Amino acid sequence: MKGDMAFLSGKGGRDAENKKEIFSSDRSNAGFKKAAPPEKLPVMESIRKPGESMIGPVGPKKEIEKDTGIKTEIDEVKGRLEQWKKSAPTQIRPEMKIEQPKKIDGVKEKKEEAAMDLSAPLAKSYLKFVLGGAALILILVVIGGFFYWKSYRRIPVHLVCQDFQCVEIQGEGENECLLNGDCLPAEPVLPQSLILSPKTRTIEINKGEESSLWDKLESSLSEVSGDETENILERILIKMVDGFNKEYADLDRFLSLAAINIPSALAQFIEQSDINGENYTLFVYQQPEGKRLGLAIELKDGAETAEVLKSWEEDIKNDLSPLFLSADISDSAAEFKDNVYREKNIRYTNFPEPDLSIDYAVIGNMLIIGTSRDSMYGVIDILIDNDQGSDSVSTSTPTN
């Protein structure tokens, strides 16, 4: 191969040596001189013309053959070089750029990046774990310190109610409250009505405003509601308010506020009650002529009150005058008469005002006082229809 390359580059090679040997006169002459026919070989007669030498011309013919052979060898060498270039591996071709180191560096960089990508979340998770653990430990320390301070270092206190406020007092003791709302007085117990009624009206009287009962009551009764219908009885409750303290007025308190007088002889027959307002019922009756007030009082024994009530008829008009509100009955005569409604005996006296009167009756152990005939009839209807005025309950009416 080196000889071929040297030959192509003009520096000789095997062909040059051959050429040198071919044109060497010494070699040619020596060959011809030493050559002799072998022995015992048949002698062939050559066909030649007379005078023609057996050895042809040497010079010009050999040079032509020599040039032709060199050219042929050159062509063969060139062909082999072309085949060698084509069959050579692509990675050593001069036009190809080999970047194997760069590829290796790239792989290393990717591996390093992948390692960094994996290590970053691990580092963040570890940091979160450390911070979370530290925070948890801090919280536990704070809670433990608080309970230690509360149990061993804090001065003992307890909660009590003062002026409707829940306040903290130093020293051992049981808690009376936890919030200010615990110190507010409870709503008073709602008293049961002696007469069943579908509606209840409440009048609140603040401390120091006791004289305003009738003004507030008249103002409340003057309000017209859309659902008012005739022949309807409505209960009225009187609630006393003193700051946060509230209670319903008992019978004695109501009689004092209303300026109504009950004779002591009758008062001894009145049933006492543990719940304020449960032994009497103030009511208003809606009728075509207007609203009429009435009063029901629970008695211990209604049968024994007949004579007491008869003796009260002389003063009953003045003692019960506040129940007539703004109506003036001072000059009216008070002559009582008997009446019966649904087998219930009634004593009554009429006044000049339309449908204005004093009607009273004892039904069972209940004294009913009305300021009109219709209001008395309405109460009797309710008591009988609700089995409160059955025949098993004794009734009495004072006799003349």
Image (cartoon, rainbow, N blue to C red):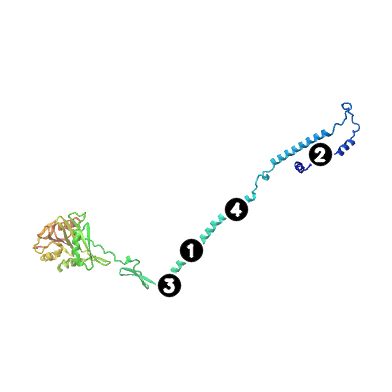
* Mark 3 / mark 2, whichever is N-terminal: 2
User: What residue would you read off at disc 4?
Assistant: 109
Q: CA distance from mark 4 to mark 3?
A: 63 Å
Find the distance from the CA under tag 3 to the CA under tag 1. Answer: 25 Å
Number of residues whose C-alpha sits closer than 10 Å to that of mark 4, classed few (under 14), some (14–19) or many (20 or more): few
Name above or below for residue 263 compared with residue 64: below
Q: Which residue is mark 1?
A: 135
First along the sequence among labels 3 and 1: 1
Query: Does the CB distance between marks 1 and 4 fall below 8 Å?
Result: no
First in residue order: circle 4 vs circle 2: 2
- Which amino acid, mark 1? Ala
- Which label sits in the foreground, 1 or 4? 4
- The quarter of the picture where residue 264 lies is bottom left
The quadrant holding residue 213 is bottom left
* x, y percent for residue 392: 18, 59
Task: Return the mark for residue 199.
Answer: none
Q: Which residue is mark 3?
A: 153
Residue carrying label 2: 19
Q: Quadrant of the C terminus?
A: bottom left
Q: Are marks 2 and 1 in contact (CB under 8 Å)?
A: no
* For discs 3 and 2, the disc positioned in front in the rendered view: 2
